[in-house]
Each structure stands twice: as structure tokens, then as C-alpha cells.
Image: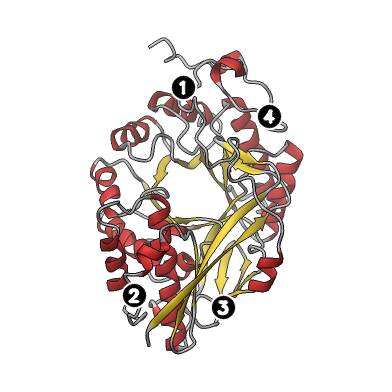
Amino acid sequence: MRITGYRTLTTVQEWGRPVGDANGVFSDGVVPVPIVIVETDEGISGVGLGPHVEIERIFAAIEGEDPRAVTTLYDRMLRHTFKAGHAGPVFGTIGALDTALWDIKAKAAGEPLWRLLGGRDRRVPAYASGLDIGLTDDELVSAYEVYARYGLRAAKLKGGLDIERDRHRLCLVRDVLTEAGHGVRPGLMLDVNEVWTRKQAVRHVCELERVLDLIWIEEPVRRWDADGHAAVGRGIRASVATGENLTGLEQYRPLIAAGAIDIVQMAAVWGVTHFLRTSALAHAHDLPVSPIGNSPIGLLHAATSVPNHLTSELQDLTPPVGVSVDLHVEDGAFVLGDSSGLGVRVDEERIRATTRRSETRTSESPNVRPERAGRRLLAGVDGIAGTPRFPGAPLHSHNDVSPTARH
């Protein structure tokens, strides 16, 4: 079997409501989902959900090769990006191609990928993650009531801009999940997407921990700040989770060495091989792992085969437009099916007929870091502090002024 070519296309995830984080919001809830399809001379094709930036240069590393040699082909792709580097969307393109190769390998073996990788249990524990910072209180409650009906008893909210607001929203979701769980205490996490300084992070989380028991705080400071993550971890009770934006084992090593990570995360877009290698690194340091992403299908399969998987992110309950996946959600877990490979099917005609496009390039989207991120030290003064306003979010109170602002 030989790799003969590839196709690329882009579909969308239609949330039907605003989605985003502290950096910005897609107000129409339409988010782009790029797809790569790798072809072979035996008619077996593989699907990878992820970017196709610089794909011609990267594909040259695997063209004509046997797709079943997945891990060595992964290293060949890394070597082909040696001079320019493999960070960001280039690493995502490698990840998309890698995932497609794993899909081919499992299809050629006639097995679901979870079985090929050595998984025993097709159930993957999940937590709800609504990308919900743009929701009103009523919308927030309604969204998590739906998650609760699928048995989800842990939730990660977006926040980081207002202590009182975050506390209020976390309590609303706590009450929804407690009722659904007949009084069993739910798990709560907060994701702030790198918007704080170290002292802002400690102060904000400590205030929340006066009334809430958080499992983890996610990306409290910049992704590469090993000392900063470690300082935050020493100052709070909650675990520190980070890693979704790290691209390669070399970027994890400084944080692990500094004792800066309690929960090691990997984005679905970086691919299966990256997840497996990072999981092994984390396991060597007795650290759990948790995949991130709205369509983490490859990592869900891989999660069944590693000993330190903790829980996986479940965002939208429906797949992207034109994509079907052989899995379902029940009793708080993804349940993988028996289809060979990833169990992903792509309706290319439907995707090409889709006319909706997202707001990816607008300055208010979550993909654009705000100019004053990490410097929002004057509360309640949007014109000075640059604090974005979201539907249903009250103005900051003066109690939220950072005591570190004068330093």
C-alpha cells in the first residue's frame, strides 16, 4: 500500500449560539473545521480533522510511502519542517496527516483504532465544556441542563474577566449538575485562556476557592511560562492544567521539570502520535492527561490505550456539518463504535454546498489575543482596561481591582 495524494476541504461547526472565551467570541456560533483526506493506491482513505497549512511541503515527506508506518512518517514530517519550525498550524497540519494515517492503518487492519492501539474499554470519561462566556445566565443553565441529560457531572466554564461573574456562573452550573446527580457534588473547572498575570491568577482563584472547590484552573498564564504556572500552583488549592497549545515534547519538558503542570493537556488537532508520546512523558512523571478539542475523535481512540487518561473534553454534542462519527455519549462518557479506523465519514458534497462561513478573521474572535490581555488591572473601565463585554455579563465592581496594579 502506498500514499498517492490528498484532498482538503473546510466545513463548519454550527453551535446555534455565541461561543468563545476571555479573548473573544464567535457571535454567530459558526466555527471553521478544516479537514484533510489522505488517499492510497488501494482505495483506502484516511480522515484527519485539522489545518492544511504548508501541506504541499509536508506531504512530500510521506508521498509514496506505506501509510502503515505511521510513527516513522510522523518523524519524517517533523524533519521536513526543520528549518522553518513546526509550531502552530504547521504542527496542526502534521497532526491532521498523522491522524489520517492512523485511520488508514486501522482500516487496513479491519479494526477500530481504539482496538488497534490496544484499548480494552471503548468508554472514554468526559466533561462538559460549553465555550460559554458569551451566554446569559438563562442560556448557561439551559446549555448545561442538556449536558446533564447525557450523564455529564463535570463541567469546564470559560472565564477570567470578573471574579464575581465567574463565581456566580460556576455556582449556577454547580447547582444544575448537583440536581441532575441527585446531590452528588459535581466537578468544576475554569479555563481562562492565558489572560492573567501570575498574581492575578492567584488572587482570582483564591477568591473563587472561598466558596467553590475547583478541580483545575486551565491556562492561567502564558503557555510557555513554566515558572509562572508553578507559582500559580503553589498559591492555590486547585490543580493547574495546561498544554493544549504546546507543540512537541520539548515544549512540555520545562513545565514538567518545574513542577508547573498537574493535568497535562493536548489538543486534538496535534494528532494521535503527539498524544501518545506526550502521554508516555506524563506517565513517567505520574501525571494524568486530558485531551482538548471539539472533534477529538483520534485522541479519544488513543485515550483508551494509555494508563493515565483522566477525562476528555466534550464540547458540542453534534459533529461538524457533513461529518458523521461512530460514537455516542451516555452516562458521562464517549462510547466509541466498532467501525474500522476512526469511524469518521465525510460527506464532501454537503460540505461544498454549505455556504455559511465563520468570523475567524474578525478581531473579536477567540483566535485573536486582545491588545491588553494580561494588563486588565483597572476594573470597570472598559476604555482604559480594554475589557471586552459579553451578553449578560455585568460591569466589573471596584472590588475586582487588582492589588498588584501599582507594582
Q: Which residue is mark 1?
A: 375
Tell me which amino acid carries mark 4.
Answer: Ala
Q: Earlier in the sequence, mark 3 or mark 1?
A: 3
Q: How many marks?
A: 4
Q: Which residue is mark 2?
A: 70
Residue plotted at (39% across, 71% down): 305
The crowd level at tag 4 (other Cα within 10 Å; few <14, some 14-19, many 20+) is some
Tell me which amino acid carries mark 1.
Answer: Arg
Asked whether the viewer can see residue 142, the reply is: yes
Mark 2 touches mark 3? (CB < 8 Å): no
Q: Earlier in the sequence, mark 4 or mark 2?
A: 2
Tell me which amino acid carries mark 2.
Answer: Val
Choose between 99 and 241: the one closer to the eye.
Answer: 99
Q: Earlier in the sequence, mark 4 or mark 3?
A: 3
Residue plotted at (71% across, 33% down): 391
Q: Which residue is mark 4?
A: 393
Tell me which amino acid carries mark 3.
Answer: Gly
Residue plotted at (29% across, 51% down): 84
